[in-house]
Amino acid sequence: MDTSSISDAVFENLRLELRRGCLTLAVLAQLRQEHYGYTLRKALTERGLAIDESTLYPLLRRLELQGLLASEWREEDKRKKRFYRLSPHGESTFKLLLAEWQAINTAVNNIL
Amino acid sequence: MDSTDLFERYLQEVRKYLPWQRQDDIVAELRTNLDAQREEREGELGRPLTEGETVDWLKELGAPLQMAARYQAPRYLIGPGVFPMYWHILRLVAIWATFAYAVSIIVRLVVESHSAQWIGAQVMEYPAILVTLAGWITGVFAVLEFVSERYPEKCPDFLAPASRWSPSSLPPLEKQPSAGTKPRNLMALSAELVVRFALLVWLLLIPQHPFLLLGPGAAYVKSGPVVLLPVITWFYWSVVVLNAVEFLWQSYNILADQWQQKNTVQHLATELFGLVPIAILAAAPAQAYLAANPSATHSLPPGLSIADLNHYMFAGFVVVGLIKIAQLCWDFWKTTTRERNPIRAMLLP
């Protein structure tokens, strides 16, 4: 394994670490409006945050299990879909996370 | 092979690795989301996806095992990167260890001379052997997980075989259970397996401890007016073999993830082989099952002879045999007249 591929792998790991927390925040923010999995992914991609299906759909399940999201199966366009939105607990958690994010963002900008 | 077929095969494979309580719900949601994505792609192209495009798309989604692994609770010992290979090897080892252990017992039984108690002891040792093997494999993979987490740049590709996964390797679609068929439950099936195992041990212990079958009557039989003829021993061993085969078959089904649907061919084969013990009894030389006990301390009740007993037993076995044959014919008829079943597919073009 040469030096460039080692640094690529290290960069990839750091990038994924950085993205992980941001993704959760972005998903919570987007789910202030109701979405089902596919439209949520599309909305995130349109706003510049592409996310894999195999990451997003299990993430939605995890957030629901943590009580941050509420979901229901409903028919739309003759197809049953599972719609997600922020739960009351999710809304309050989102506000706290957003404040934290803004504080970190300001701090990092000051450092940079 | 069309793109829908590949897509359904992908979902079928993902389902196999999902937690069984949430399989239906997760697969339904995945289907809705992925269908919408596919329709949009097809809308942009103005035509259905070709097979090659579907293959590329499924590759983008990732190997079914990895897709399913993300729905599992976080694993701190073995993470999703290493888990596919760990799971694959664990299942392979479990299947081959079971097979090798069964063969070794059979060979030792044939070559050496052992009591039923020895067989019982070997069977009882089996779970401990499996647990030890699983422990070793888990230990090795926990080390690999540790290394791949901390030194990912030093890990070779073989730790992630899912990256070399290809949709063309997806198994064909399995037959869906007909409407009204109750889906199988892994817990119930596992409980059934435990009961089968206990039944097998019980059967193997009977020759050394007849009281397990006859209770206090075992003492009476020892000095009773009759003894069992060798045909009963043959009958006994055929029952043991039948139960052992069913136990191994069911273990294999669970380990190979083939437990979701009842295997019709397997079920009919079991019923067919179930006729063997009865056939052994019905074909007994001179239809004799009992003989006079030379060391008897008491005799049969007046008016009852050994010939009468043998005659009644033979009649009983014939009746049981006929009932079993009728049951087999009924099940066979039900299977062949039901739509979408493997027997019908084999018999009818």
Image (cartoon, helix red, strand yellow):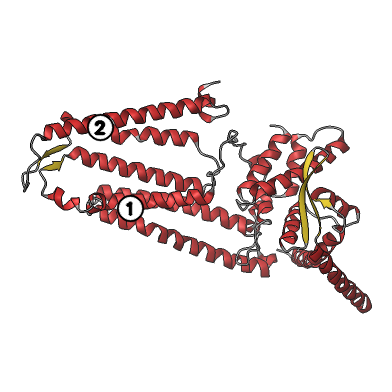
* Residue B250 x/y as whole percent: 45, 45
User: Which one is in front, B162 or A59?
Assistant: A59
* Residue B115 x/y as whole percent: 23, 53
Above or below residue B166? Residue B122 is below
Q: Is residue B104 left or right of residue A85?
A: left
Residues at marks 1 and 2, CA–CA distance in whole angstroms: 27 Å
Q: Residues within 10 Å of mark 1 (few under 14, many from 20)?
A: many
Q: Which quarter shows the N terminus of chain B? A: top right
Q: Residue at x 60, y 51 (%)?
A: B20
* Residue B147 x/y as whole percent: 63, 68
Q: Is residue B211 left or right of residue B52?
A: left
Above or below residue A110? Residue A13 is above
* Residue B220 x/y as whole percent: 14, 50
> Which residue is label 1 attached to?
B201
Q: Is residue B293 left or right of residue B66?
A: left
**Circle 2 — which element?**
helix
Q: Residue at x 71, y 45 (%)?
A: B28
Q: Which quarter shows the C terminus of chain B? A: top right
